[in-house]
Amino acid sequence: MYTLGEFIIENRDYFSYSTEELLRLFSSIKLASKAIHKEVNKAGLTEKIIGSSGITNIQGENQQKLDNFAHKAFIESFKSRNVVCGIASEESKDFIVINNKKENPLQNQYIVLIDPLDGSSNIDVNVSIGTIFSVYIRKSPIQMNVTIEDFLQRGNQQILAGYIIYGSSTILVYSIGNGVHGFTLDPSVGTFYLSHHNLSFPKEGKIYSINEANYTKFSNGIRKFIRYCQENKNKENRSYTARYIGSLVGDFHRNMIQGGIYIYPKNASYPEGKLRLIYECNPIAFLTEQAGGKASDGKRRILDIEPKKLHQRTPFVCGPTEMVSKLEEFMDNCG
Ligand code: AHM
Ligand code: MG
């Protein structure tokens, strides 16, 4: 039984920076995720956890109590480990500057981008939700406070990305660029153990995940792709099934293991797409590529897009390379 800590140490050569700093980053992530795991497992028993916090967040959405709890848990946890110099969270309008103590012997060079609790419409109804995180090296000099440029880096600059899924069990999945690995929390001892070594997309996907209620608002290319998936041509060995949770982390996790494409295109209600480039799409795109798949906005590789603002949205598609390329082909031909 490999613990996450042991696995990190064993694979330290794949990380170009300090192992101690990587362990501190993970220590923050593990601590906050265990606190959230505990709260999620009590949802329904106490009014403190379920329902709206009464606040409208920067996205113009109704913030849930657990969104707020998760945001604070991660910020406090990262601050206390003295290893991160700036954090941007989907729940916060501006980025957060962290002034590490002067005597801090560490490099003060890590930038964290986080969606503390994704899929929050599922909190109150016992459906999987998740945390999505990614880490970059700052661009600004370490003597100064971080600047917006530190946060608006292309996804191909990520040095670490991952998610935690709070589902039938709590699983932490991450990559530092040497494949994708998953660790399941044993709640009785509070430890994450290696459970999914070297995750990768099956070559042939059979699942498509999209909110089909938006069908009439989709472009022709997307509609044609959905029809293609529905055709069920057994002769060509094409038979697809639809699965859509409405939690990116849950949909992605299942699709990576079972083989499937996730699509959130732009539509009349979300002309730029719904998902946020730097908090949601970049980390999931990094994991997708590490798992042998492809992630794009329908035309461009997600990881090459230059972010212009913190809460930028983008159309998003990720999954097995062949399925994503097929969808891009429909979009090229039909718009
Ligand atoms: P959130 O960050 O407000 O939770 O929204 C992101 C979520 C994704 O997890 C999910 O895939 C998508 O929104 C679902 O949106 P919709 O309900 O429009 O299908
Ligand atoms: Mg989100």
Image (spheres, helix red, strand yellow):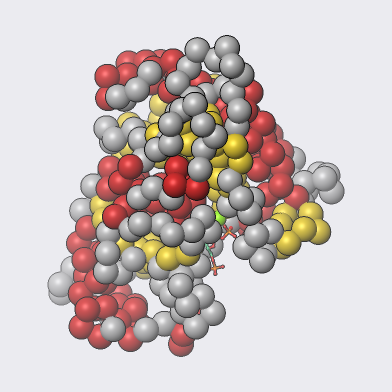
- Residue 182 visible somewhere in the drawing: no
Q: Is residue 29 left or right of residue 317?
A: right
Residue at 41%, 72% (x, y): give it. Answer: 265
Q: How many marks?
A: 0
Residue at 52%, 38% (x, y): give it. Answer: 146
Q: Is residue 242 left or right of residue 126?
A: left
From the top left corner, tell me how far across and down residue 279 is, in percent.
Answer: 49, 51
Which residue is at the front of the view, 63 or 224? 63
Which residue is at the front of the view, 79 or 216? 79
Ligand 1: give its quadrant. Answer: bottom right
Q: Where does the C terminus fall, quadrant-wise?
A: bottom left
Q: Which residue occupies the extreme right position in the image?
A: 47
Q: Where does the N terminus fall, quadrant-wise?
A: top left
Q: Quadrant of residue 30?
A: top right
From the top left corner, tell me how far across and down residue 136 is, in percent.
Answer: 41, 37
Q: Quadrant of residue 316?
A: bottom left
From the top left corner, tell me how far across and down residue 200 is, in percent.
Answer: 28, 44
Residue at 57%, 12% (x, y): give it. Answer: 103
Residue at 77%, 46% (x, y): give it. Answer: 49
Q: Is residue 273 left or right of residue 94?
A: left
- Residue 219 visible somewhere in the drawing: yes
Q: Quadrant of residue 160?
A: top left
From the top left corner, tell me how far across and down residue 6 is, in percent.
Answer: 40, 15
Examine the rendered structure and indicate whether residue 188 appears above or below residue 225.
above
